[in-house]
């Protein structure tokens, strides 16, 4: 980015709430069902029907407000946002406008160098989703109304973001919070989390905002980052060439890495908002608010700090282990069996996450229970098996989910610590490798690794490595 300029970025994030039913009716919110099956007269906007508020939607939104230090308004109301679109059967969207449920919050983001920045949240409010227009099935546009009435929580940031990286970090933190709370699954590909970016540029030191554009159609955090970077560069080029930025809505084309115009927005839409006459005001009194607050889980940043302090983990380990609530839970369940915090961290970050990422499965579907992984670590620490044997047992546990002790017993994998048996193997290997003995005697100590490898191979990996090293070194020292 040209150093003369700075960007001003605000994000509007829509999070689909994880309720079983829609915001104003009893229709299912299940994703992936046949078109126009999760519908009823209420969400289709038939005349004479009356909406009934889903209590869970209020509780989830308040919980998010509390997690982001928002003021929770005791009274909030729904309004009708009037506009025509084919996938909006009612002709208006039920949303919150002048009196939202949550306001004036903040989220803290952290950069790679450890520095931090606070991003303000203007408001968090509840609304219903519209349907979906499908343009790529034949010559006609088709409408799927399944999404009509799906509960959304809109999180509007202050224009505090200055770079695409900050926007990426903010979104990552936001997703982490909503998934920790269990109010949204954070899946951008399925549309559970959607982001629109308002972007403008101005000369550094200027207080007045430039003309903003709105960028849509970004289905991943990286696409958000790339789209914002592209739009910043586009605006700077226009200004540098003496042109003028037009207020408009733009679409991000991920395939071509290009911003494309969608529609002009020279004048703001007049949505003719007015209070919805069919819905009573939402009253969140102190008693209800306290009850909602009592369901608050430990938030990711607090959990990360606790992992560092309680388990003496490096910051890197703690950040990975607390990246999702499910992974953090898995790790702490491993620790119900073993108190080797660092070994447990290494196994979860390396072996568990490799399978989870390769198989593209959620942590809670990982075949090995955390208790069984804890038992495997315990067998190593008790010197019942070696670390190498443990790595061989792990794939067997993946297939069968058997308790590691059973596999050790079935395959006779108990580590050999008998010094007499180990000495016999050492003598055999030394006798078979006189050339390597000469190398050792000439000062090449690295050859010890060769001997250890041969001895472990001779004993099928079952020898206690510590005893092997001690006895081997003793025998070799006597030959000097």
Image (spheres, rainbow, N blue to C red):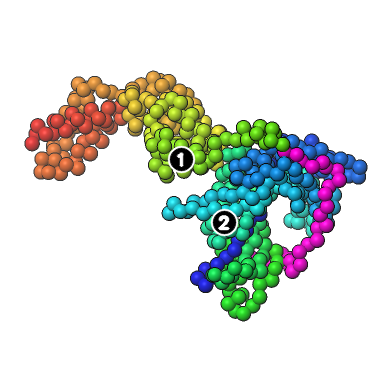
User: Which residue was labeled with disc 2?
Assistant: 167
Pair 1/2: label in front: 1
Q: Is residue 279 magenta?
A: yes
Q: State which region is magenta.
A: 256-284
Which residue occupies the extreme right position in the image? 48
Q: Few, some or many C-alpha atoms within 10 Å of disc 1 (few <14, some 14-19, many ≥20)?
A: some
> Which residue shows up at 86% across the image and 43% down it?
278
Please give the label number shown on residue 305. Answer: 1
Q: Quadrant of the C terminus?
A: top left
The spot of residue 199 in percent (x, y) is: 62, 63
Pointer 1 and pointer 2: residues touching (CB < 8 Å)? Answer: no
The spot of residue 364 in percent (x, y) is: 55, 33
Secondary element at tag 2: helix
Q: Few, some or many C-alpha atoms within 10 Å of disc 2 (few <14, some 14-19, many ≥20)?
A: many
The spot of residue 406 in percent (x, y) is: 43, 20
Which residue occupies the extreme left position in the image? 480
Please give the label number shown on residue 254. Answer: none
Q: Is residue 151 magenta?
A: no
Q: Would you identify the image quadrant in which residue 152 lies?
A: top right
The reply, left or right, for residue 164 in relation to residue 13 is: left
The reply, left or right, for residue 205 in relation to residue 37 is: left
- Decide whether the magenta segment is chiefly helix, strand or loop: loop
How far apart are the alpha carbons under marks 1 and 2? 24 Å
Q: Would you identify the image quadrant in which residue 298 lies?
A: top right
Instruction: Report if residue 195 is visible in the image.
Output: no
> Which residue shows up at 62% across the image and 41% down it?
66
């Amino acid at each position: 980015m040209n150093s003369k300029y700075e960007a001003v970025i605000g994000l509007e994030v829509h999070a689909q709430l994880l309720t079983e039913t829609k915001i104003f009716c009893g229709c299912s919110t299940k994703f992936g069902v046949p078109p126009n099956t999760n519908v009823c007269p209420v969400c289709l906007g038939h005349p004479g029907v009356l909406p009934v508020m889903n209590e869970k939607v209020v509780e989830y939104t308040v919980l998010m407000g509390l997690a982001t230090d928002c003021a929770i308004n005791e009274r909030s109301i729904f309004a009708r946002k009037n506009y025509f679109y084919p996938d909006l059967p009612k002709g208006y969207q039920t949303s919150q406008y002048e009196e939202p449920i949550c306001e004036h919050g903040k989220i803290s983001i952290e950069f790679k160098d450890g520095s931090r920045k606070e991003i303000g949240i203007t408001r968090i409010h509840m609304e219903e989703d519209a349907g979906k227009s499908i343009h790529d099935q034949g010559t006609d546009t088709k409408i799927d109304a399944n999404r009509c009435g799906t509960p959304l929580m809109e999180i509007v940031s202050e224009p505090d973001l200055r770079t695409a990286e900050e926007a990426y970090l903010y979104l990552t933190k936001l997703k982490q919070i909503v998934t920790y709370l269990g109010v949204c699954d954070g899946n951008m590909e399925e549309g559970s989390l959607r982001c629109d970016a308002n972007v403008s540029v101005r000369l550094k030191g200027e207080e007045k905002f430039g003309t903003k554009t709105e960028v849509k159609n970004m289905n991943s955090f990286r696409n958000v980052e790339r789209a914002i970077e592209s739009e910043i560069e586009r605006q700077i080029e226009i200004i540098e060439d003496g042109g003028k930025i037009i207020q408009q809505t733009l679409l991000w084309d991920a395939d071509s890495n290009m911003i494309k115009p969608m529609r002009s927005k020279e004048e703001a839409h007049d949505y003719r908002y007015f209070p919805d006459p069919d819905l009573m005001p939402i009253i969140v009194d102190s008693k209800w608010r306290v009850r909602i607050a009592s369901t608050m889980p430990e938030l990711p940043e607090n959990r990360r700090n606790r992992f560092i302090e309680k388990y003496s983990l490096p910051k890197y380990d703690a950040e990975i282990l607390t990246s999702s609530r499910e992974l953090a839970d898995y790790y702490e369940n491993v620790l119900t069996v073993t108190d080797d915090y660092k070994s447990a961290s290494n196994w979860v970050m390396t072996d568990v996450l490799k399978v989870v990422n390769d198989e593209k499965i959620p942590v809670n579907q990982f075949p090995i229970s955390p208790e069984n992984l804890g038992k495997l670590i315990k067998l190593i620490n008790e010197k019942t098996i070696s670390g190498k044997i443990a790595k061989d047992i792990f794939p067997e546990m993946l297939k069968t989910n058997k308790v590691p002790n059973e596999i050790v017993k079935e395959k006779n994998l108990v580590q050999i610590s008998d010094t007499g048996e180990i000495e016999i193997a050492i003598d055999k290997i030394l006798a078979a490798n006189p050339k390597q003995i000469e190398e050792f005697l000439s000062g090449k100590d690295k050859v010890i690794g060769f001997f250890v490898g041969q001895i472990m191979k001779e004993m099928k990996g079952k020898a206690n490595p510590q005893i092997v090293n001690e006895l081997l070194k003793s025998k070799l020292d006597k030959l000097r």
